[in-house]
Amino acid sequence: MSTPTPAVTEQLASLLAQVHALGARVERLEAELAETRTLIPPPEVPPEVVLAISAAVAEFLGHRAKVKQVHYRTGAAWAQQGRAMVHGHRIMHGVR
């Protein structure tokens, strides 16, 4: 194997320095995000939303039901379910 040229060695050193700088930046941003998440409380669920959910559950079950907990969720679960439905859909091509 041949030894790397000075230009290649310089490029590798530059890339390594950039990787270390990016790693430090990511660590700083993750720490800042964690601090921000502890300062901002989770959103409260308005009573109107709880009432609407309770009414929907009662209508679906056919009797009066109590909703004991309601949590805000991100749209990620909806998006994942939508993708699963699209990928699971089979399109038939050809002669019928």
Image (cartoon, grey):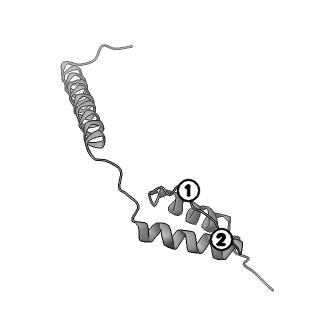
Residue 10, x across and y down, in percent? 18, 22
User: Which corner quadrant holds the N terminus?
Assistant: top left
Three-letter amino acid code at the position of disc 1: Lys
Mark 1 in CB contact with mark 2 (< 8 angstroms): no
Residue 13 in the figure: left or right of residue 57? left
Q: Disc 1 marks which residue? A: 68
User: Which corner quadrant holds the C terminus?
Assistant: bottom right
Residue 62 in the figure: left or right of residue 16? right
Residue 85, x across and y down, in percent? 63, 66
The relative height of residue 15 versus residue 90 in the rendered view (above or below) is above
Q: Quadrant of residue 67?
A: bottom right
Label 1 neighbourhood size at 10 Å, few (<14), some (14-19), many (20+)? few
Q: Disc 2 marks which residue? A: 64
Residue name at image x 68 percent, y 64 percent: 88
Q: Quadrant of residue 81?
A: bottom right
Residue 18, x across and y down, in percent? 21, 30
Is 34 in front, or is 58? 58
Residue name at image x 54 percent, y 59 percent: 80
Q: Residue furthest bottom?
A: 96
- CA distance for labels 1 and 2: 13 Å
